[in-house]
Amino acid sequence: MIEDLIGGLGVVMQPLNLLILASAVLIGFVGGALPGISGVILVVILLPVTYTMEPTGAFMLLTAIYASSVFSGLITAILYRAPGTPEAVMTALDGYPMTQKGEAGKALGIGILSSAFGGIVGTIVLIVATPMLADIALQFSSPEFFALAVLGLTVVASLGGNLLLGLIGVCIGLLIASVGLDPLTGTARFTFGSLHLMSGINLIPVIIGLFAISEVLKRCQEGDIHLSTKSFKIRIFDWPVIREIRGTVARSSIIGTAIGILPGIGASTAAMVAYSETVRWSKDRKRFGRGAPEGVAAPESANNAAAIGALVPLFALGIPGSGTTAVILGAFIVHGLTPGPTFMTGNSDLIYAVFVGLMLVNVLILVFSKPFIAVLSKLLDVPYSALGPVIVICCIVGTYSVQNSMMDVWLMLGFGLAGFLLEKIGFPLVSIILGVVLGPIAESELRRSLAMSRGDFSIFAERPISAILLGLAVILVSATVLAPMLQRRKLRKTAAKQS
């Protein structure tokens, strides 16, 4: 392995390949920071460019864009609460409140360091443990995937402080996810005869509408105010902050890598689970959602680790771990390559060049992020009366570019208005997003599980991993319900003693 890594380093250090990597990182920065333009869109756009390239350079380009775009989604999530990518949704929960408190530089520094660390952890695991992790992922079948989805749904449903509103939000998200063709039978559901809804409601318009457009409406209602960048300073290596978040970053990186290698789960889910685990481990849960540094560190380290982890099943099994890696799989096939169990032995030069390239990408994130953000953050000096319309235009263009559909644009605007109104009553919008993300996974895997067991629900209890995951979900919901009751009982006892 050491010899392979040295050989890969030699390939990466060639001037042309270094230029490809640096260009890919900057392209990923720009695309990831623009709401609605995610890594998968960038990879699709640049896929034709790779047809005339050598396979090594082509896949270094695509994987570097993928990794850097996952990182840069945090920039607009923190500064404007407009996540540039779906993976950055959770980052906005605490990153944007930090910006409102004048701590944008601190939030961005935490995000940059956490992202780079998570990406490096994911790459190390990718290099060292690909065969072993692939074997673990193979043990997951439909019951385990369903149980993981249920755990994720119950976890985020309890984050907003109001379990009832959280569960309602999850149900709304599940309803949105059920629009379109039934994944197993092909029957149309909730389409109302519209051909535009036959393929379902895309995640991008939901996210952009609920977070970005609703925030523009909120800021317009508040008046023409904007933040000054005069005291805006990013400190990546702030040692007191590092000591505060180091446990969160380490734990979330491991969680992200583990979830990333499970095919079809994705970095967005990893960020949500890591955030929820951070809340669970915290001694003061009320800080989250109000500008907690750990609330930025957890999702950013997890989603970057998961993005790299998603390459494990692609390289080892030929199974894409995410939407972007599915496009990269298509690129492999176009170049006459077939990822799978024998792929690493037959194409070690290419694979280890990609591995080393991904490690270098995370270093370049630390190098390039500050000057890039310095340019982008100047938008904070622009009055919101001018900036708001630009954000809306970017959202419209980004949403339309996903499927070239005006229906998506109208849906985005509709979700924006709905998010604006729901937030006025303290509704946890993130629970809706989670329902949309995990709904299809939960539904498909539940039905496949029941098909495996011929309708017997005991299959979830008979399989140890699914039983443990579902047990954790029950414990979490029970704890969320019982905690306020126990707290009130304790207060009554305290009051009785004092009287």
Image: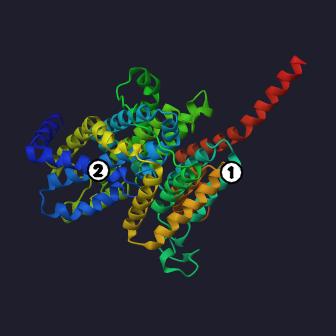
Foreground pick, 26 / 378:
378
Residue 221, given in percent of the width and then of the height, sits at 59, 52
Q: Residue at x 41, y 52 (%)?
A: 85
Residue 229 at least partly seen? yes
Tell which residue pokes out farthest to the bottom in this image: 193
Q: SS class of the residue under badge 2?
A: helix
Q: Residue at x 46, y 44 (%)?
A: 271
Cα gap from disc 1 to disc 2, whole angstroms = 36 Å
**Disc sitting over residue 187 in the figure:** none
Q: Which residue is mark 1?
A: 425
Q: Is residue 329 left or right of residue 243?
A: left
Foreground pick, 58 / 15:
15
Image quadrant in which the C terminus is located: top right
Total number of numbered discs in the rendering: 2
Residue 246, given in percent of the width and then of the height, sits at 43, 26
Q: Which residue is mark 2?
A: 28
The residue type indicated by label 1 comes to: Ile
Q: Is residue 222 left or right of residue 141?
A: right
Q: Residue at x 13, y 36 (%)?
A: 6
- In this view, the mark in front (1 or 2): 1
Answer few, some or many: residues within 10 Å of disc 2's Cα (few below 14, many 20 plus, some between 14 and 19): many
The residue type indicated by label 2 comes to: Gly
